[in-house]
Amino acid sequence: MTTQTDIPPAETGGDQRSWLREHSELGVCALLLALGVLVLTDALTMDVDIAQRGPVGPKTVPIVVGAGLLVIAALLALDVLRGGRGQAEGGEDIDLSEPADWRTVLLLSGVFLGAAVLIEPLGFPVAGALLFWGAAFALGSRRIDRDPLIAAGLSLVTYTVFNNLLGVPLPGGPLMGVL
Amino acid sequence: MNALNSLLDGFGTALTPINLLWAVIGVLLGTAIGVLPGIGPAMAVALLLPVTYGLDPTGAFIMFAGIYYGAMFGGSTTSILLNTPGESAAVVAAMEGNPMAKSGRGAQALAAAAVGHFAGGLIGTLLLVALAPTVAKLAVDIGAPDYFAIMVLAFIAVTSVLGSSRIRGLASLLIGLTLGLVGLDQMTGQQRLTFGSLQLADGIDVVIVAVGLFAIGEALWVAAHLRRRPPEPIPVGRPWLGRDDVNRTWKSWLRGPFIGFPFGAIPAGGAEIPTFLSYVTEKRLSKHKDEWGKGAIEGVAGPESAASASAAGTLVSMLTLGLPTTAVAAVMLAAFQQYGIQPGPLLFEREPDLVWGLIASLFVGMVLLLALNLPLAPVWAKLLRIPRPYLYAGIMFFAAVGAYAVGGEVIDLVILLIIGLIGFGMRRYGLPVLPAVIGVILGPNAEQQLRRALQISDGSVTGLVNTPFAVTVYAVIVLLLVWPLLRKAVTRSRAAA
């Protein structure tokens, strides 16, 4: 994980940073370690005097899982330091020869969060349409004439199918109140 | 012939207009999903899990099975016309299919694949009819220790057979088990990893985890590396086969299923290994060895037939033992849990209408798929031209619908995004997604069976291995663990010789 805060002295800076970039998978180990500590702390601070049925209580499995996470974090770190690398997943639409496009990922996540916030005040049809249009925009579609129409159509049809045909209630919002 | 009677009853269920409609929707969706890049059957079934809230189980599973089989049919289209297989099962189809398409024999390649899927699916499903009730009967009085052993087998198989790195597989499994721990302990009501939050006390719904890892994770990952110019599919006419093509392929169609079916039933990664084995077998038996690599039709026919048969094999383990051997089976297992149905030997006794209706619908689905795919392949191929922003925006959209439908809570969407980001990170660093999903789905269940077994044996560990069934399963597990070491030793001694 190359962060701006730990910039080393100038002469070794480039070296260290490229080392960190090479070994960014160690970040995964750190996360697994943190997760393991979290699970273990939660398990060990658990208060289990309430009627435990059977010899194995609610603490046992979390302790095993937590310990497993710690062991795996260590083993993975060892593997990475020895030169092992997780292979990034390929796919039909994936071009791994170019560096990751973080802007699109952030934009897409932002659009998704925005839609999540808007779903209750505006209702599903509007928020869903904004989600589709926003996501298509983030992914590079710029057809102002076509994108919003597709988004609105998809959102309305989905709303009707779920809300009226499948009986899964979705919030209609003010728009559905008017229609 | 008890199975035959049950199957006839099953056709009674499968051929009602409403269930027929679900089968049609399933195979249409499945074919489309198979053809579409970037979206596989596991993601599709995960995205459709919310329909389980409004649909009866029989209809839902008929649709899911249609998607599974349909995606197999559609998947080979992409491989043959684009040469960029999205799923590991379709890699082999590209090896001979794409050269065929390039040399103007795309129509024959598509036909050989479609008929291969039909033959493989048919033979595989017949084997399913013949074997599943027997397996279910053998396993009918399995108890807590046996269930626990099966789930341990699923955990070990999914981490040690799939993927290139066992450590990364185990890391993924542990992430899944951790997510499965969140919520109230099923036996004591103790809060675990809830941090006092009321929302987390209910646990994280399997739908959210599956959709987050399969759909959001994939969409974000593709977004980071989107190919700027999608490859152009090779234009193709209506699939057909000449007499000499049929003469060359009919044996391959019939051989494939016997390789595919057993590999589907055991936890060995689904269709990936059997398609490759079938490819190698056909190559060895072929009379046209010079054509291999340049478009030998047997190299499409055999593996595709094996792929569909492996799907039928997968259903045997899932229905009779509750053991998911592929990602699709895992998500279907999650759907069973949504309905509160426990797949396993008792399923055939308790839900005969559901099981036999589902199996009969597989036959219906296969006929529909052959009818849809042979004449309409050029139409399906048009789906390859869909603008990628719409495709992935659509995946994000339906993922949001699915997660919101779980409980109508905005917080679920936030959790969905977080799990999606975890899925993104896992794809970046080569952690396979399937072990995590299996961990979430089977983890809580495995813990319950473990504790029940130990409760019966009063805490003695021997309570876990006191049945022949459990001992057999543990022996298989040991074999799985030792196998790579053995193989290494064998190749080393061979290299030395």
Image (cartoon, helix red, strand yellow):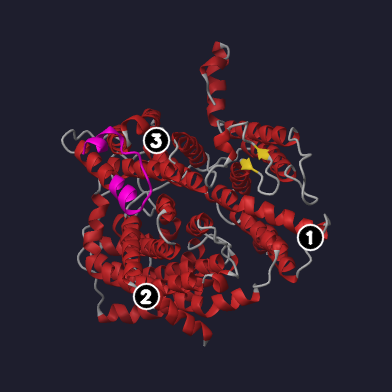
Query: Do pointers 3 and 1 mark residues of a single chain?
Result: yes
Q: Amino acid at mark 1?
A: Ile
Query: Do pointers 3 and 2 mark residues of a single chain?
Result: yes
Q: Which residue is mark 1?
A: B456
- The mark found on residue B224 in the picture is 3
Disc nearer the start of the sequence (3/2)? 3
In this view, the residue in front, A23 or B115, is: B115
Quarter holding residue B204? top right
Residue at image position (38%, 64%) is: B66
Q: Which residue is mark 2?
A: B288
Q: CA distance from mark 3 to mark 1?
A: 51 Å
Q: Amino acid at mark 3?
A: Ala
Q: Secondary structure under badge 3? A: helix
Query: Where are the magenta residues, as a range?
Result: A158-179
- Where residue B129 appears, as percent x and y from the top left, is 49, 78
* Magenta stretch: helix, strand or loop mostly: helix
Residue at image position (40%, 74%) is: B13
Residue at image position (33%, 58%) is: B29
Q: Is residue B444 above or below residue B135?
A: above
- Where residue A137 appears, as percent x and y from the top left, is 27, 33
Q: Are marks 3 and 1 in contact (CB under 8 Å)?
A: no
Labels 2, 1: front one: 1
Quarter holding residue B197? top right
Q: CA distance from mark 3 to mark 2?
A: 43 Å
Residue farthest top in this picture: A10
